[in-house]
Image (spheres, rainbow, N blue to C red):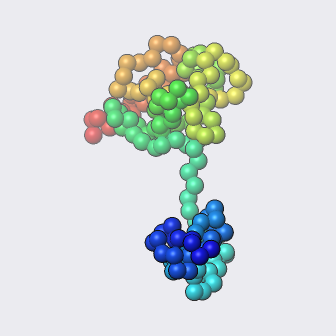
């Protein structure tokens, strides 16, 4: 291998074929600079401390959404993305599905995605959008429960306005 040349610096003295990477030819100096092995053993992590730090870190539940306040009435709500990539402002709480009009029934999946139930009528509860009961908007005309929620929100909103 006397005619071997280092691919890094072009020197022929000490140049030889190295097993890694892909049988390249380098001189001893370029090889030593490329691989630079540490002078010491790596430090071991304190596993108990690491686990304790992870336990302390708060983990948000995606089903809760991103908390915010409505820009029109300042009611506390949460943002959820739909399957189509749009964002909905969801009213807090759960409501009996049978009392909410079809098309206004929503579920929030485990990953936080809001899914419209359409005309489906499961026997339990569903969520509603804040847009349907926002007191800064017109009263809903398609459901007695939605109207009752809107009236309650409207009373609170008017009381805040008069303070």
Q: Is residue 83 above or below residue 110?
A: above
| Residue in the picture at 47% in, 37% down | 79
Residue 160: % across, % down: 32, 37
Count of numbered labels shown in the rendering: 0
Residue 31: quarter of image: bottom right
| Residue in the picture at 58% in, 23% down | 116
Q: Residue furthest left?
A: 162
| Residue in the picture at 65% in, 29% down | 125
Q: Residue furthest bottom?
A: 39
Residue 106: % across, % down: 58, 27
Q: Is residue 24 above or below residue 80?
A: below
Q: Nearer the viewer, residue 51 or 22?
A: 22
Residue 118: % across, % down: 61, 18
Residue 108: in sight, yes or no? yes
Taking 151 as reference, is 143 left or right? right
Taking 10 as reference, is 121 left or right? right
| Residue in the picture at 66% in, 69% down | 19
Q: Residue furthest right?
A: 123
Residue 137: quarter of image: top left
Q: Nearer the viewer, residue 80 or 123?
A: 80
Q: Nearer the viewer, residue 99 or 78?
A: 78
State which quarter of the image contains the C terminus. top left
Q: Nearer the viewer, residue 114 or 28?
A: 28
Residue 30: % across, % down: 51, 76
Q: Residue furthest top?
A: 141
């Amino acid at each position: 291998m006397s005619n071997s040349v280092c691919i890094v610096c072009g020197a022929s003295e000490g140049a030889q074929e190295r097993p890694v990477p892909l049988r390249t030819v380098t001189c001893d100096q370029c090889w030593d600079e490329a691989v630079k092995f540490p002078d010491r053993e790596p430090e071991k992590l304190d596993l108990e401390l690491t686990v304790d730090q992870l336990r302390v870190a708060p983990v948000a539940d995606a089903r809760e959404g991103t908390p915010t306040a409505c820009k029109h009435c300042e009611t506390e709500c949460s943002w959820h993305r739909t399957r189509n990539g749009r964002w909905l402002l969801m009213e807090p709480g759960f409501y009996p599905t049978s009392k909410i009009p079809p098309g206004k029934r929503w579920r929030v999946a485990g990953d936080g995605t809001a899914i419209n139930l359409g005309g489906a009528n499961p026997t339990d509860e569903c969520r509603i959008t804040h847009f349907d009961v926002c007191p800064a908007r017109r009263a809903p005309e398609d459901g007695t429960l939605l109207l009752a929620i809107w009236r309650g929100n409207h009373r609170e909103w008017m009381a805040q306005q008069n303070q």
